[in-house]
Amino acid sequence: MEIQYFEFVKHLLHFKRTVYLDNNATTPVSKRVRRKMNQALANHYGNPSSFYGIGRKSAETIEQARQHVAKAVHAAPSEVHFTGCATESNNAVLKSAAAHFYPRKKKIVSTPIEHPSVMNTLAYLKTQGIVVEYCLVDDKGRILLAELEKQVDDDTFLVCCMLANNETGVIQDLAAVTKIAREHGALVLSDCVQALGKIPIDLHAWDVDYASFSAHKLYGPKGIGALYVKQGSPFTPLLHGGHQESGLRAGTESIHNIVGFGAACEDIEKLLAETGKIRALKRDLVQRLKKIKPDCVINSPDNETECLANTLSVTFPGVENAGLMGMLDYRGIAVSAGSACSTGEDMPSHVLKAIGLSAQAARETIRISLGHETSASDIRYTTKVVEDYVKGRASFVNMLAPAQLNENILFDENTFILDVRPPNDRERQKGLPNAHEVSPLHVERYLNQIPREKQILVYCPGGGLSVMISYYLKSKGFKRITNLRGGLDGWRKRRGDLYEKYAGQNVTVLEPDTAE
Ligand code: PLP
């Protein structure tokens, strides 16, 4: 009896525990940064463009923050411009360079493992006539410099190479990339978002022309980025309007966010000093995972100087990442599959594809990114949960393969189909017949309307979001939960015949219970 009670309490404690291992998606805002931001909100409300004292004070505060950011990346303060986010910084550079050089020069050479804010902007520029070529990378994501040398030619106006990758943590030899670009008079853009606060950055020494940064990856606020434009490198603003940021980025400055970015950068030395501790935790994690599943594959580079200390991409053959992530979430642990932007879709990450993983291996891969608050006990707890799952000891959500979803299940009276798709997907395509639509953001407000005696079939577009919600429902005492693996997209691909015949029929939109 006592043992049972102890197990029950342990079970409850597990649910309470939160372990955040997705620091490459974003980081918590540090206490010091929050304090500085609160002070700025309270005291610096003046418009920095106004000439009177209150405005001048705001302008001065911004200049102090700029100095902190510039110092952190070895740039002159006049070369650092605040933006709304790193996505904006990347867009601004790519579009500006294209406008400046095209049609005199036509080509951009990029790595194939850039963040979507670069990849999707390049895809857009292609529609405008720009030639985009992707340089090969090896199985760890390292750019093949000999290949790059062959690709960059006199028609190339820009080389685009991130400093550190968000999914695998691979670090590129940026100085070598710049040297190759220079030989052909090409400019260089480097997305340094994941590197700032994790490795030393010296923009002047590496001689890059443009670099992008984002405060929320180093314990600063979200919604504030920075753009480095080397003195003399051509740049046309993306936004036109007022003359803020030396005329390069119009719009009244977000003073508290800028102060937060500056404060985060003041802590750079401290962050860098903790790299050794974080690396040791990652090493421990790798050893534990290898013990649990000896055939697991580490996709991040082994060589310490070539990989961010905090980032681990790992493939567990035979273990679908959606189910594993759902279980980890159920036990309070946050990790990601690929990048945050692609989570929820059934598309293997372009980064994992580029380093040679098959679509199946990509679906068996998770990214674990440690942070400054990660402890040895977090690592032990996480590996224990992984072990329980991989060895089949955890309580599972059933997984239904898309091909198995047939008319018997769709029209079974004892099956309750729960549609947790986001609104944009509901606009994009019709859903399963007999489904009950709920808002995926507030599933807790529909619990009374979901029958406990029935089999609940949960589905979303790609099978990722629904597995999280499936485990949530399990934690709320629903016993018979099944997740549609591959989601609606997967089912549509495998059973296009049934989709054509039944999609969208007899759908019920549930109304949420009023919030307390
Ligand atoms: N570049 C990289 C490598 C990133 O990891 C991210 C964020 O996920 C971005 C750019 C975009 O940054 P932001 O969220 O500031 O737009």
Image (cartoon, rainbow, N blue to C red):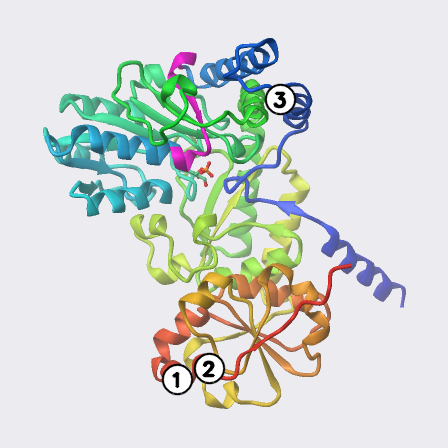
- Location of residue 71 in the rendering, given as x and y in whole percent from the top left corner: 47, 14
Among the two numbered marks 1 and 2 on one chain, the one whose residue lies closer to the N terminus: 2
Tell whether label 2 touches label 1 (CB within 8 Å). yes
Taking the spot 57% from the left edge, 32% from the top edge, the residue there is 221
Secondary structure, mark 1, is helix
Secondary structure, mark 3, is loop
Residue placed under numbered mark 3 in the picture = 45
Quadrant in which residue 439 is drawn: bottom right
**For residue 299, side relative to residue 33 (left or right):** left
Residue placed under numbered mark 2 in the picture = 405
Height in image: 408 above or below 134? below
Residue 290 on the magenta span:
no
**For residue 512, side relative to residue 292 (left or right):** right
Q: Single out the residue that lies furthest toward the right.
A: 2
Residue placed under numbered mark 1 in the picture = 498
Of residues 31 and 17, which is closer to you in this image?
A: 31
In the image, what residue type sits under mark 3? Tyr
Q: Measure how far apart labels 2 and 3 are at the Cα level.
A: 58 Å
Quadrant in which residue 45 is drawn: top right
Of residues 502 and 294, which is closer to you in this image?
A: 502
In the image, what residue type sits under mark 1? Leu
Q: Would you call the spot at circle 3 few (<14 residues within 10 Å), some (14-19), or many (20 or more)?
A: some
- Location of residue 321 in the rendering, given as x and y in whole percent from the top left corner: 49, 59
Q: Measure how far apart labels 3 and 1 are at the Cα level.
A: 59 Å
In the image, what residue type sits under mark 2? Leu
- Location of residue 304 in the rendering, given as x and y in whole percent from the top left corner: 43, 32
Of residues 98 and 217, which is closer to you in this image?
A: 98
Q: Is residue 202 visible?
A: no
